[in-house]
Every structure is written in C-alpha cells, then in structure tokens.
Image: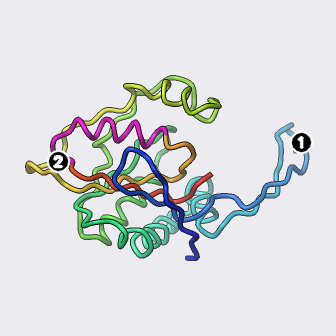
Amino acid sequence: MKVNIKRIVGMWKLGYALDKHIISSVYMGDNAHGRPQFNTTRTEVGEALYQLKYRRDSGQAAALAEAVCDNLCPRFGAVQLVIPMPASKGRIRQPVYDVAQHLANLLGVHSFERLLLRRPGGAPLKDLHTRAEKDQALRGRISVVDGIDGSGPYAALLLDDLYDTGASLNAACVALRTYAKIGDIYVAALTWK
C-alpha cells in the first residue's frame, strides 16, 4: 500500500499518520433525497479506510494493519500492546478495533479494545470548530478500565483512524497517564484530515 507518512505531535512520545485521507472532493449537486453528492478522490490508505468503515469491507483491516506494521512500527521503540481509540459512533463492528487486532497479531502482542472507555453524549467533535472547543468537549470523557494483567509499565501503541487536531488522542493520553501499567505511548493514525 502506497503511503505518505506524516509526523503528528501531541502528548505522546512519538506519532505518525500513514497518509492524507482525501486528495480532492468536488460537490456534484444533491441527489433525489436532497443529500449532497461529491466526487471524492482518496489516497490508497484513505480509500481502504473508507471501504472498511462505510462499505463494510473487512478485508481492508488486514491491509491497513500491514501498512502500519511495515511503515510506522519500525519508527517506534518496542511496542508491547496495542490500544485502539474508543469509537465515537456505535457500529456492529468497529473498524479501528479490527485493524488493531490484526496489527497486534502481526506484532505478536495483545490488543486491548476495552481499555479506553468513551462516555457517550456531548456534541460530535466534527461539529466543533476550534481545538479549544474539542478539548473542552472531551475533558473527562475518556477513562481507563483496568484490564491488563501484570504490573507494567508497558509501551503502548495507540491506534486511530483519522487524525485531525489531535484532541481525541490527547484526551486518551491524559487518561492513559493515570494508569500505572502504561509507560511510553506511541501513536499511529491511518490517515490525516
């Protein structure tokens, strides 16, 4: 999978995103139901993520995990566990959880999809315009559930699908820093906005 890696900075030790999500998006008018239609061109990573999330193409999870494993993981120290970001929208299958499980298998470590808990409610982050608004909306909304055996601290790879301002990832890092079993935190995002 072709990538264009970008370093992302936040409350983590080191972080990267594989590629931009969308190359271009042109408004084509509204459909018969009054919904806007777009002609969207995505990067290869962006298209794989789109197919996984919105077309339920579960085969994309393994390809995205391989891209993270091959292109981002060598940049980090030894990763001892994978933590997917908690979902902001309920789905039968959570795409980031699927990618995290495949990635953990490739790395020979465990994935902890229920370690971070996101309290429901509040305005969707996509409807907020500033980083300060997003930080405020997330304050205290992400918490840690003790679910790791052993004493740690373990080097964790925090996995997210789309990096925008970094507000969600920072909120997750704040929560993880309260958990004595977590040491270094690395971040891998599949795409950036």
Task: Please give the label number shown on residue 15.
Answer: none
Residue 10 % position (x, y): 43, 46
Q: For the residue labelled by badge 2, is the local secondary structure a helix, a strand or a loop?
A: loop
Q: Is residue 184 magenta?
A: no
Viewer-proximal residue among 6 and 138 = 6
**Mark pair 2, 1: CA separation:** 51 Å
Viewer-proximal residue among 144 and 33 = 144
Q: Residue at x 30, y 35 (%)?
A: 175
Pointer 2: what residue?
A: 148
Vertical side of 111 occupied by 147: above or below: above
* 28 sits to left or right of 49: right
Q: Quadrant of residue 1?
A: bottom right
Residue 155 % position (x, y): 23, 56
Q: Please state which of the two labelled residues, at mark 2 or mark 1, is closer to the viewer.
A: 2
Q: Which amino acid type is shown beneath numbered disc 2?
A: Ile
Q: Which amino acid type is shown beneath numbered disc 1?
A: Ala
Q: In the displayed orientation, state which residue is furthest to the left.
A: 151
Residue 40 % position (x, y): 77, 58
- Tell how many labels: 2
**Highlighted magenta segment, given as a residue range:** 167-182
Instruction: Pick whichever of labels 2 and 1 is earlier in the sequence.
Output: 1
Q: Residues within 10 Å of mark 1 (few under 14, many from 20)?
A: few
Q: Residue at x 8, y 48 (%)?
A: 151
The figure's colour scheme reads rainbow
Q: Is residue 178 magenta?
A: yes
Pointer 1: what residue?
A: 32
